């Protein structure tokens, strides 16, 4: 749970505070507080493409309102049961996974392992998988999940070398597993 909080504080709250073009841009209100677990499940729901019924309108007028997928506390159990019924699960990456991926460019650059590449590139510590451990994010549905202009979509065409891959893995290890890398944004 601590890693979920680290992720949301680093990549949602701090990022949105400095990003003028985000959904919380010039006229939009910044979230004062975010429930880390609700945000995490909402991100999972987006990846699973299970956002029907959880899209909420936040804000009180045109300039301050936006639609966002939020799984409220009353819908958490329903969402988990629905995901389990469709045999969709969350695979949490650990320190050993990042050590393994750090030097394996052929694995990461293989289109069949796109979900791993996106997770590493987005500094996430999870991948959404089916019961047979096959990744849900793939070359066929990435546009539907993230859109054409997203960082995740752009990652699919990048060829990572060992130095870049190692650096990205080291950042994740520093964030989540008390690694030695120093990160300037934190």
Image (cartoon, rainbow, N blue to C red):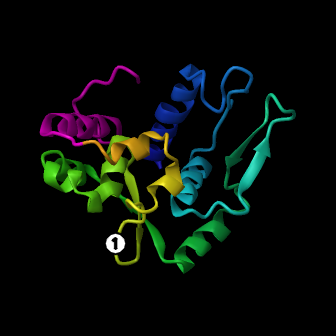
Who is closer to the viewer here, 77 or 126? 126
Image coordinates of residue 126 in percent, x first then y, are: 39, 54
Q: Would you say residue 48 sits in the magenta stretch?
A: no
Asked whether residue 180 is drawn in magenta, I would say yes
In the image, taking residue 80 as reference, residue 73 lies left or right, namely: right
- Magenta-tinted stretch: 159-186
User: Disc 1 on helix, strand or loop?
Assistant: loop
Give above or below for 157 relative to 72: above
Q: Is residue 172 left or right of residue 50?
A: left
Residue linked to disc 1: 133
Give the mark count: 1
Residue located at (79% from left, 30% from top): 64
What's the residue at 40%, 22% (across, down)? 185
Q: Residue at x 22, y 33 (%)?
A: 167
Residue 70 is left or right of residue 121, and the answer is right
**Residue 184 percent coordinates (x, y):** 35, 19
Q: Residue furthest right?
A: 61
Can residue 93 be seen here? no
Q: Which quarter of the picture shows residue 12?
A: top right
Q: Is residue 108 visible?
A: yes
Number of residues whose C-alpha sits closer than 10 Å to that of mark 1, classed few (under 14), some (14–19) or many (20 or more): few
Q: Position of residue 34 (x, y in %)?
A: 64, 39
Point out the image quarter for the C terminus: top left
Q: Nearer the viewer, residue 25 or 5?
A: 25
């Amino acid at each position: 749970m601590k890693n979920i909080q680290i992720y949301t504080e680093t990549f949602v709250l701090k990022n949105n505070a400095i990003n003028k073009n985000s959904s919380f841009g010039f006229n939009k209100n910044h979230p004062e507080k975010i429930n880390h677990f609700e945000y995490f499940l909402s991100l999972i729901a987006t990846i699973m493409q299970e956002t029907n019924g959880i899209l909420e309108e936040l804000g009180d007028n045109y300039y301050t309102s936006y639609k966002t997928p939020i799984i409220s506390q009353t819908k958490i159990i329903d969402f988990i049961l629905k995901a389990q019924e469709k045999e969709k699960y969350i695979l949490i990456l650990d320190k050993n996974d990042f050590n393994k991926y750090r030097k394996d460019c052929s694995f990461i650059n293989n289109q069949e392992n796109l979900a791993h590449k996106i997770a590493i590139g987005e500094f996430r510590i999870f991948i959404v998988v089916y019961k047979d451990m096959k990744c849900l994010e793939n070359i066929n549905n990435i546009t539907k999940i993230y859109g054409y202009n997203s960082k995740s979509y752009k990652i699919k065409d990048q060829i990572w070398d060992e130095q870049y891959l190692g650096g990205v893995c080291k950042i994740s290890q520093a964030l989540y597993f008390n690694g030695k890398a120093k990160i300037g944004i934190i």
